[in-house]
Amino acid sequence: MCRAALSGESNIKKAEAVNDGIVYLMVIPYLLVAIIGVLIYKMYQSKSKKTE
């Protein structure tokens, strides 16, 4: 249905906007997981330095 709505030469801007929105929605969860991973890594490193 999306393909049918966005097909044709007159809807190029709309198709680009939909593609950008999809990429935006895909990137956010990966960034959140990466940030949480870095925070956990830093907490683990700080705890291991304190025990030494």
Image: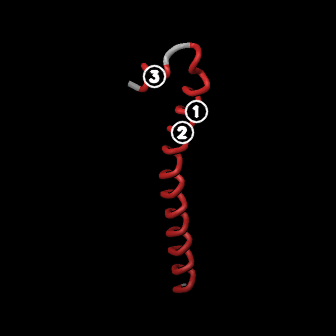
Which residue extends farthest bottom? 51
Q: Quadrant of the rendered structure where residue 1 is?
A: top left
- Could you tell me which secondary element the residue under label 3 belongs to? helix
User: Mark 1 and 2 residues: CB-CB less than 8 Å, in contact?
Assistant: yes
Query: Is 51 in front, or is 37?
Result: 37
Work out how far the residue at label 2 is from the one at label 3, CA to CA, in angstroms. Answer: 16 Å
Question: Who's the residue at 57% across and 81% down the image?
Answer: 49
Which of disc 1 and disc 3 is earlier in sequence? 3
Query: Label 3 belongs to which residue?
Result: 5
Which of disc 3 and disc 2 is earlier in sequence? 3
What kind of residue is marked 2? Gly
Please name which of the two marks, 2 or 3, marks the residue nearer to the observer.
3
Query: Is 6 in front, or is 34?
Result: 6
Which residue extends farthest top? 9
Work out how far the residue at label 3 is from the one at label 1, CA to CA, in angstroms. Answer: 13 Å
Query: Label 1 belongs to which residue?
Result: 17
Residue 51 - label: none
